[in-house]
Amino acid sequence: MTDDARHIANTTWEALYRTQATVTRELLERDIWEGLSTREYAVLMALAAEPEGLRVTELGQDVLISQPGMSKLIDRLMSRELVERCEDEDARARRVRLTKAGVQLQARMAAAIAEAAADILGRGLSTQQQIQLRELVLAVLNGVPTPFAAIQRKAMERNMK
């Protein structure tokens, strides 16, 4: 790899990093979170796509958090009656799924987040450019041959439907 290629890759990564951090910061400043952290919302979002629920390990891979951290997060969501544990076909495991209140909260927040994202991204990008950016990000994930990247691709593709 040439020095120019390394420089381009590094500045591209930095641009992605800084953009994601800036957009996230602006989203966090909006009154749309209803007392949840972004990770707690990410759990609700992952479970919304899986009505039968997910195992804690699956949730951790989707939400980017360790199993012990995920267990604590699930306990917090359970205390708010947003998720519940249920039986799995493997008797040694348990699944987590949304409660009715969790479904309602996730839907309300998803609409608010979509509106905020449309506002933020729409200031700098046309709809076509947003589609191109989404495709470019998926292409980056496609170039990462790890199970973790595959989980993230699946989550992105699930959310695109």
Image (cartoon, grey):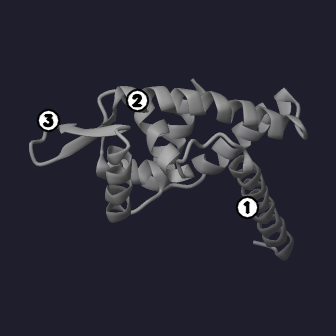
Q: Which residue is mark 2?
A: 101
Find residue 111 and report its image quarter: top right
What is the crowding at mark 2: few (fewer than 14 residues within 10 Å), some, or many (at least 20)?
few
> Residue sitting at 56 percent across and 50 percent down?
38
Question: Regarding mark 2 in the picture, which secondary structure is present there?
Answer: helix
Q: Nearer the viewer, residue 135 or 23?
A: 23
Does residue 65 show up? yes
The secondary element bearing badge 3 is classed as: loop
Horizontal side, residue 27 vs residue 40: left or right: right
The answer to whether residue 1 is above or below residue 24 is below
Quarter holding the C terminus is: top right
Q: What residue does disc 3 label?
A: 89
Marks 3/1 in contact by CB < 8 Å: the verdict is: no
Residue type (three-letter) at the residue carrying disc 2: Ala
Q: Amino acid at mark 3?
A: Glu
User: Mark 1 belongs to which amino acid?
Assistant: Tyr
Provide residue 138's location: percent of width, then percent of height: 64, 42
The residue singled out by tag 1 in the image is 17
Which residue occupies the foreground of this view, 119 or 66? 119
Q: Looking at the image, is mark 1 or mark 2 earlier in the sequence?
A: 1
